[in-house]
Image (cartoon, rainbow, N blue to C red):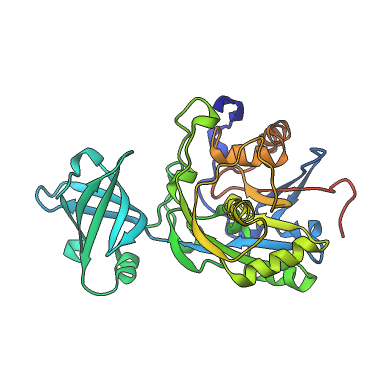
Amino acid sequence: MDVSYFDYELPEELIAQTPLKDRSSSRLLVMDKDSGQTDHRVFHELDEFLQPGDRLVLNNTKVLPARLFGVKEETKAKTEVLLLNEESDHTWEVLVKPAKKIKVGTRVSFGGGLLTGECTDILPEGRRKIRFEFEGIFQEILDRLGEMPLPPYIQETLDEQDRYQTVYAKHRGSAAAPTAGLHFTEEMLKQLEEKGVGISYVTLHVGLGTFRPVAVDTVEAHTMHAEFYEVSEETAKALNATANGEGRIVAVGTTSARTLETIVRDYGKFQAASGWTDIFIYPGFTFRAVDSLLTNFHLPKSTLMMLVSAFAGRDAIMNAYREAVDHRYRFFSFGDAMFLTDGLAEGYQ
């Protein structure tokens, strides 16, 4: 399957550079994944398409202020480090710029020496292993020195760092936000619960591999980077009850969807588990866990375009994206949302 099959034209001015002041005022394109029928709404109207007994599954990962700016101790040359995965003993897998200048043994100082790091290994694709040295608590130092690692297509400065976090973010570990959840407010989640919609949480720490460009010509040749996930006993129990009842399991974001599909693939049902997943979902994949999917609009030729195409059909997705462009929707991380569901023709409420 050719990667270009998932390409589309997007005017640059439709790439959202800043978040809206009101999270829930984003636009919402609702699409029936069986018929391709669409409806144009506002995000806070999502409740009109959810029924009592349905269950939202949210990814409660929290983005690290993982972007650090320092200088090489030997030459004072400027260096940028992006934290990816913590391994052990304060050693992290990182991306560095300029990568060619960071060799094994190179030491980098951050915050005037508040934090120092030494390169211990060279990895493919510009990655390194760096062992950090500091006094105090690493997370507090990171809060002081680090910046949010916004995607490269966002050129504007983010004034409020919390706008790149969901309101329910809890467990630190992501290099990028699970952006479908950025639209929810605490009030909206409360209203959904009052309606009878269940809310459960999973954790998947988002790595840059999910968002990196596909560098091969054919889909099948692409390899996903592994990401850490965790599903609690409480969540597994609630999901099995929903699956055995009449409600739908609604994954909020592709990260939640990948977590749920990993669990059911590996265990045959929802079960408490944790580990690493490199599940790659593209057309031909059979969904066994997720009934409906809430997601943002994704980059052309990305693995996320492949996932939503697998869920709702490539032709239907491409038609919906063309419609979103025609209606001037905002795209990508700070953009608008899309709800892929079924039964739109029959109506809700």
The x and y percentages for residue 290 are: 70, 52
Quarter of the image for the N terminus: give it.
Answer: top right
Relative to 303, residue 58 above or below: below
Q: Quadrant of residue 349?
A: bottom right
- Which percent across, then down, holds residue 125? 33, 38
Residues 95 and 231: in front is 231
Determine whether, in the image, residue 276 is placed left or right of residue 285. Answer: left
Q: From this viewpoint, is residue 229 visible?
A: no
Return the x and y of residue 140 as percentages of the image width and height.
32, 71
Residue ID at (44%, 51%): 207
For residue 331, side relative to residue 284 (left or right):
left
Where 225 falls versus 301 (above or below)?
Answer: below
Residue at screen point 71% across, 30% down: 315
Q: Nearer the viewer, residue 159 or 161?
A: 161
Q: Residue at x 18, y 44 (%)?
A: 103
Q: Quadrant of residue 240?
A: bottom right
80 up-or-down from 219: above or below = below
Left or right? Give the position of 224 relative to 91. right
Q: Residue furthest right?
A: 346
- Residue 232, visible in the rendered structure: yes
